[in-house]
Structures are given as C-alpha cells and as structure tokens.
Image: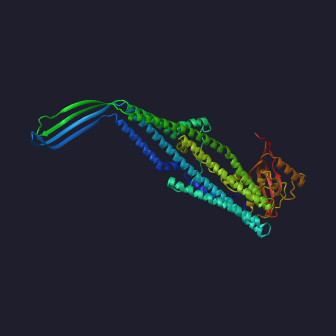
C-alpha cells in the first residue's frame, strides 16, 4: 500500500527536478538584463532619441551666420562696335549672411526641439518598461503553466490508481461497471484539460524563445517585495502621475506643440538679415572698358510676409497644441483608472493568498480521508472523484494567484517606471511549497519531524510480548500513513474516519467502557473549535509483524484551549489494516489559554 505521507512518484520526480532546477535556475532579472537592449522596439526608440538630438543640432545652427564663396571661369565671344572679340573671365566672390531677427522663431524652434528630445527619452523609458513587463509576464506564465501541468499530472496518476482499484472490484463483482465508466469519464476530462494546458505551455515557451533568444529550461517562481507606500492608493497615483514614462512623453509633446505656436507666431514679424559680400578677384582678358576688380558691400534687408499663409500656419500650430494637451489629459485619466483597478486587484490577490493555501491543505485532507472512506465502503466513487477534482482546482487557484500577484505588481511598477529597478533590488524567488502541489496532505509536524528511530521504550500501561527482531521491512511507511490518517480525521472532526482507526473493542482504560469512550470522543470532536494538531519527536518501533508502537510529543489546540503531552499509540493488525489498540498519555498535559 502506498503511504499517504509520501508524494506520488510523479510528484517526487517533479520535486526532484524542481530542486535541481532551483540550484541552477535562471532568475528573472538576469533574463531581463540580458535581452532587454536586443529587442527591436528598444532599438527603434533609441534611434528616435538620436534623431531628436540631431534636430536640436539643426535648430542651434540657425543662430549662426552662413558663409558663401563663389568662383567663375567663363569664356565668351563678345562684339564691340561690330567687331567680334573672344573674352575670358575669372572672378572670385565671398559673402556672409546673418539673420539678426525673425520674431523669435529660432528660439521657439530650439525650445520645441529640446522638448521633443525629452519626449523621445520618455518614450525609450516607456518601451524599456513595457518590454521588461512583457518578459516578466511571459516568464511568470511559463512557471504557472508548468506548476499547473505538474499538479494535474499528479492528480491523473492518483486517479489512474483508483481506476485500477475500481476495475479489480468490477471484475470481482463487488461494484457496478458503471463506477468504472464514471472513473474513466473523469480521467478523460482531466486528460483533455492536460492537453490544453500543454498547448498553452508550448505557446508560452515559444514566445519566450522569441523574446529572449534562448530556451526556457530552468525558471524559478518569481516575486517582487512590496515597497513602503504601495498600499496607499493616493500616494501611488501621485507617484505614477509624476513618473509614468508614457504620460511624461505626452506632456512633453504638448509643451513642444506650444513652443511650435511661437515658431508660427514669429512668421508675422519682418525678418531682418545682415549680409556682407566682397569680390576677391576679377580677371578679364581682354580688359573691358569698365569693370569692378575689388569691392565690398553691406546690405540690410527686411522681408515682410503678406497673405494668409502665415495665419494658417499659426492656426494649425494652436490647434495641434490643444489636441496634444487633450491627449495628455485623456491619458492621465486612463492611467489613473488603470492604477486604481490594478492596485485593488493586487491588494485582493495578496489578501486571499493565505486562504488559498489553507484551501489546498483542506482539500488534501478531505481527499485523503475520502480515499480511506472509499476503501471502507463509506463513500461513493463519485464523492472521491469530486474531492480529487476539487483538490486540483484548489491547487490551480493557488498557482494562478501567485502568478497574478507578480504580474499585477509588475504592471504597477511599469506604470511608475520602476519595474527595472525593482527587479534589481526587490526581486526574490518564491517557490510554492512542494507539499502544497502534491495530492496527499503532509502536515507541517510530520514534515519537520526527525527521521524515525526504533529505540523508544514501550508505555508501562501496555503489556506487549517482545518477539525476536523483525526483518528490515517493518512496515513503517504504512504505519506513518495510518498515523497521518489519524491526525487528519481528528483535525477534520470526522468521527467516522477517526473511529475506524481504532479496534472495534478499544479499551480506553480508567474503568471506562468502549461505548462511553465513543460517546465522549463523538461529543469532543463535534464541539472542538477549529482543532489543530502538531506532533514532533516521532519515533516508531516494530514489536512484531502484527504489532507496532508510535511515540511522539503532541501539541493540541482548539479555540482558546491548548495542551502538550507525550503520547504512545500501540497498533495491531486487524482485517489487514493497522488499528489502534492502546492510547497512553505518558506525561501530564500542560494546558492553558491562548495568548
């Protein structure tokens, strides 16, 4: 018989692989740092930022004068007084032109260029945060799907064992063949779900390869520690309004559009240009009657625009500024709504997380108890199948909650432009406890107990004949399974399961009859408020092939009552099952009110 205290073979395999991967798992921040700058969207944003820098350089050049040089070498045939004459002309001129006033258009253009450059820088930050979130989401999705596939595979393995057991009973004529059909229907449903999950996992892994250029071989469950102030919605909204890269870029573009209104307004003013030209050299052969060899000239010109072209340009600039400002205001409203929605979802996900762990542990206990009940004929196969599916659904909800917390927090950090820095400073691995992903409940007490020894002294109140030393296989796994079933039944206040673990004529001692003990235990189990048991220092000793003793320290709590005792349970084989024949308290209880 497989011990309920031990994980299934598949769960053990997954646990072993998980531990191996954990030792060499590639952390999310390392993946992001490695591939972030290789993304096409990031390279595009970087190129646009460099283009914005180049526009600033162009705007600055308008403040400097322009210099011109010209050289002329011409051969011509002239006529002078009716006589043809071949003439060669070589002439050099230099000019300097400087715009000294244009209504402030150059200044406004330079200001607009600087604002566009700031917007491009904010766009780059926004793209970096978006890509970081995309990688985080994909990384988390793969971990979520792998955990879910492993959980469902373990459930299927357990259901297949139940199916084999049911098939044997059908062949023996003990139950109806319809029970076998019911089990097969459940298996087909879950195998279909498993196929869907594997398809989703394959898509997520392919997307990971596209994003990172590497295979998702070893990933760890990611998490980001909350920072102070993350729970204050007003402070969070204000912080994101100040630091959101996309909103910052929109506001910078609106300001740049306003500066462009100044550029258009400058066209209403006359342009004043100062120019200086000088002839450097002039050689004409043969020499004409009159020509200029050297000269210098200073000229000031006014250019006054007429018509409606400039008025239309100004109107266009004003309307574009208003549109850009309206877009920024609309984006601020959307960001505020997203922040509120995401923060509330994240808060609720964190609040429900401990309850989901309790749900998984309870579902494991119920599934274990129902399997015992089914073996004893007190529960139907349909009841058992439902509890197994409930356990998988509970584990799936827990896995998705962990992934949801990470992705929601990453979204909030991305809105604040802080995701990349948070991955470097506040990231940590947060694997789900392997016991929660299994199909069998493993109590923290037994999980933390030392390796069982077999040198405990027997209880003085129980007389046992000590036979020769038993063989190496003393039945400890089965004994640990029955002890766990005893703990589960007591914690679940399941009297029927609890009573089934004792021999039919159990003698409680102190002159009480079996009936009196049964009435007392039924009443105490029914009245206990949220009972919780924990055992430690567990020791097991095989007395013979038909007798076993378990010695441990028991911690019990129900409502405000607590006690700690040292207890020994003596087990005997009855109808092929280990059952309790003696229960002895070896030390007086220490009881008191809860703090």
Visible residue check, residue 110:
no
The type of colouring in the image is: rainbow
| In the foreground, 354 or 54 | 54
| In the foreground, 116 or 386 | 116
The percent position of residue 493, horizontal first and vertical second, equals: 80, 51
Q: Is residue 286 left or right of residue 155?
A: left
Residue at image x 57%, y 49%? 137
The percent position of residue 382, horizontal first and vertical second, equals: 76, 59
The image shows a total of numbered marks equal to 0
Q: Is residue 274 left or right of residue 508?
A: left
| In the foreground, 230 or 569 | 230
The quarter of the displayed image where residue 349 is located: top right
Q: Is residue 86 left or right of residue 115?
A: left
The percent position of residue 331, horizontal first and vertical second, equals: 54, 39
The quarter of the displayed image where residue 542 is located: bottom right
Residue at image x 59%, y 53%? 143
The quarter of the displayed image where residue 15 is located: bottom right
**Residue 419 position (above or below residue 172):** above
The percent position of residue 101, horizontal first and vertical second, equals: 34, 30
| Quarter of the figure with the C terminus | top right
| In the foreground, 580 or 307 | 307
Q: Is residue 52 left or right of residue 464?
A: left
| Quarter of the figure with the N terminus | bottom right
Visible residue check, residue 312:
yes
């Amino acid at each position: 018989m497989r011990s309920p205290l031990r994980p299934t073979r598949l769960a053990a395999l997954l646990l072993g692989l998980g531990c191996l991967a954990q030792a060499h798992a590639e952390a999310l921040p390392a993946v992001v740092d490695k591939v972030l700058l290789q993304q096409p969207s990031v390279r595009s944003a970087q190129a646009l930022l460099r283009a914005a820098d180049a526009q600033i350089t162009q705007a600055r050049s308008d403040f400097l004068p322009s210099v011109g040089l010209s050289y002329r070498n011409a051969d011509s045939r002239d006529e002078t007084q009716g006589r043809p004459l071949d003439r060669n002309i070589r002439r050099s001129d230099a000019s300097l032109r400087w715009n000294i006033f244009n209504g402030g258009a150059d200044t406004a253009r330079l200001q607009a260029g600087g604002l566009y450059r700031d917007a491009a820088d904010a766009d780059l930050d926004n793209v970096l945060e978006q890509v970081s979130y995309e990688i985080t989401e994909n990384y988390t999705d793969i971990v979520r799907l792998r955990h879910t596939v492993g959980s469902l595979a373990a459930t299927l393995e357990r259901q297949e064992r139940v199916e084999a057991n049911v098939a044997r009973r059908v062949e023996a004529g003990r139950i109806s063949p319809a029970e076998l059909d019911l089990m097969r229907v459940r298996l087909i449903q879950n195998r279909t779900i498993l196929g869907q999950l594997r398809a989703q996992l394959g898509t997520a892994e392919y997307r990971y390869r596209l994003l990172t250029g590497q295979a998702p071989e070893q990933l760890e469950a990611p998490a980001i520690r909350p920072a102070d102030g993350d729970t204050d919605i007003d402070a969070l909204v204000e912080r994101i309004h100040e630091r959101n890269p996309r909103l910052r870029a929109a506001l910078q573009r609106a300001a740049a559009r306003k500066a462009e209104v100044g550029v258009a307004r400058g066209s209403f003013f006359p342009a004043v240009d100062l120019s200086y030209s000088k002839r450097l050299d002039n050689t004409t052969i043969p020499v004409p009657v009159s020509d200029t060899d050297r000269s210098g000239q200073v000229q000031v010109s006014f250019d006054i625009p007429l018509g409606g072209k400039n008025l239309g340009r100004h109107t266009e600039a004003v309307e574009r500024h208003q549109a850009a400002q309206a877009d920024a205001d609309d984006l601020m409203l959307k960001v505020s709504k997203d922040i509120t929605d995401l923060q509330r979802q994240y808060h609720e996900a964190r609040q429900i997380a401990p309850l989901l762990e309790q749900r998984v542990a309870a579902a494991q206990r119920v599934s274990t108890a129902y399997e015992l009940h089914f073996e004893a004929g007190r529960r139907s196969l349909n009841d058992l199948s439902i509890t197994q599916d409930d356990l998988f659904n509970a584990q799936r909800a827990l896995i998705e909650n962990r992934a949801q917390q990470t992705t929601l927090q990453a979204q909030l950090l991305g809105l604040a432009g802080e995701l990349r820095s948070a991955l470097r400073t506040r990231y940590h691995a947060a694997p789900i406890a392997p016991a929660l992903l299994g199909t069998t409940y493993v109590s923290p007490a037994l999980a933390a107990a030392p390796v069982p020894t077999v040198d405990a002294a027997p209880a003085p109140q129980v007389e046992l004949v000590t036979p020769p030393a038993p063989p190496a296989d003393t039945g400890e796994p089965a004994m640990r399974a029955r002890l766990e079933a005893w703990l589960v039944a007591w914690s679940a206040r399941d009297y029927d399961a609890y009573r089934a673990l004792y021999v039919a004529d159990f003698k409680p001692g102190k002159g009480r009859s079996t009936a009196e003990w049964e009435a007392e235990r039924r009443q105490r189990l029914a009245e206990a408020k949220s009972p919780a048991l924990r055992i430690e220092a567990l020791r097991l000793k095989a007395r013979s092939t038909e007798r076993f003793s378990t010695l441990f320290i028991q911690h019990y709590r129900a409502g405000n009552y607590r006690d700690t005792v040292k207890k020994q349970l003596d087990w005997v084989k009855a109808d092929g099952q280990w059952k309790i024949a003696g229960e002895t308290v070896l030390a007086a209880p220490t009881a008191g009110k809860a703090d």
